[in-house]
Image (cartoon, grey):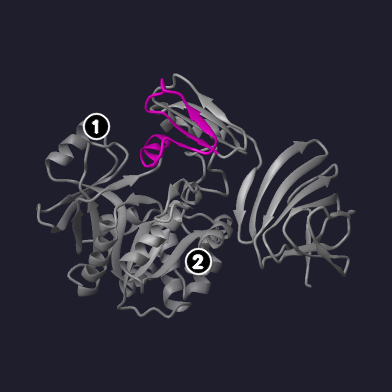
Amino acid sequence: MNIILLSGGSGQRLWPLSNGVRSKQFIKIFQNEGGKPESMLTRVYRQIISADPEASVTVATSKKQVSSIINQLGDRVNICVEPCRRDTFPAICLAAAYLHDEQGVAEDSAVVICPVDPYVEDSYFEALKELGRMAEEGNADLSLLGIEPTYPSEKYGYIIPVSEDRVSRVNTFKEKPDAAAAEKYIAEGALWNGGVFAFRLGYLLQRAHELISFTDYRDLYARYADLEKISFDYAVAEREKEIQVLRYNGGWKDLGTWNTFAEAMEEPSLGRVILNETCENTNVVNELNIPILCMGCRNMVVAASSDGILVTDKEQSSYIKPFVEQMEQQVMYAEKSWGSFTVLDVQEDSLTIKIVLLPGHKLYYHSHDHRDEIWTVMSGRGRAVIDGAEQAVVPGDVISMPAGCRHMVSADTELKIIEVQLGENITVEDKHKYPL
């Protein structure tokens, strides 16, 4: 099975756990079978491999999410990077060209597209395998997975099938309706459109070439910024005549808001949290190393991270996005391919950061023009290179690097460092990289 996971998100709807770098699919809020924390991304990948150990998984994503994907999945997946955001049709075309031209996937192979962040039962991935087989059989150019609706939602588009058979031709699509229209659609046998579909790779490439002028993956990548922003549903699905839908009636949730996200939490709280006996239907997530005490809270969500603190009624949590858009704040926590960083303190002329460097990883050999830096090694062992001179680093070491000094550090074991940046103009752009 060739599966393309669409990984997007602005990082606003689940603020403060999500931010511009850490979208909701990277938040480690679940537990795997061994009791260890896992994110939506790692959960979905685990479920795919459980259903099909030979599955080839490609994540279609933006540049800013690549480090988080590598941090959580390493080299177990392929990554197709969008140079910029151009909605789902260009993203899927780029990923299809990547599979064909860079990975050598044959045109008659089935490809399944699905979001990276559904909260679903394992039966969902068995349905994806069936969807892939339907695409291979070629009875329709496009095969969709339709979710049996459990209530008249205004958040989803609807697929109207021709019949109530498990596999049916599609009559039409309906955009996100109001509640009354949703009830009408459901009465007519409509299904939620969960953004899951399958096709033969050659079919999609043909449709891509009909709508976009390009020769191959690399040419499409180079032209990507000039492409029209358009969804796959509008560009392809709603105009396709040979289209079928597979009904799915297993557990499925779109965890797009704090309210639905809280429903998927296995425990009412995570982190250092105390909920007294008067709390009802309240969920708390605390990523800070300080306690949170809740008393008499009802139907609430409380979330705390380095990026901020949220206290909200669950119903109101759906309206968070415009308020987060008004906030001007740098990213305070991010996972990177080499580890992670947490901003501890921001002053007018200084910045203090905690760096966690994973074993076998390193920071680039680099320098800064406008700031001095001081490293204090908290734990772990590794080595540093300061202006070409190599030295071992151990807990308690303090290394000072004035502006212009070339420096890097690598980790033999997990290495935790407190980095203090001093200067009048501290920016991420102030960096020069060098070979070593």
> Closer to the observer: label 2 or label 1?
2
Q: Residue at x 53, y 30 (%)?
A: 310
In this rendered view, identify the residue nearer to me: 199 or 346.
346
SS label for mark 2:
strand
Q: Check disc 1 and give the amino acid type.
A: Ala
Q: Which residue is mark 1?
A: 179
The reply to whether the magenta stretch includes residue 283 is: yes
Give the total number of marks visible in the rendering: 2
Give the quarter of the figure containing the N terminus. Answer: bottom left
Give the quarter of the figure containing the C terminus. Answer: bottom right
User: Label for residue 257?
Assistant: none
Q: Residue at x 23, y 53 (%)?
A: 146
Question: Does residue 428 appear to the left or right of 390 in the view shown?
Answer: left
Q: In the figure, residue 328 lies in which quadrant?
A: top right
Question: Does residue 392 appear to the left or right of 54 in the view shown?
Answer: right
Write the start and end of the magenta stretch as one range.
257-286
Rate crowding at label 1 as few (under 14), some (14 to 19) or many (20 or more) other CA atoms within 10 Å. some
The reply to whether the magenta stretch includes residue 321 is: no
Q: Is residue 78 above or below residue 266?
A: below
Q: Is residue 57 above or below residue 327?
A: below
Kindly report the distance in space between the C-alpha atoms of the residues bearing marks 2 and 1: 38 Å
| Residue 122 spot, x, y in % from top left | 29, 57
| Residue 72 spot, x, y in % from top left | 52, 59
Q: Is residue 161 above or below residue 3?
A: above
Q: Check disc 2 and give the amino acid type.
A: Ile
Q: Which residue is mark 2?
A: 79
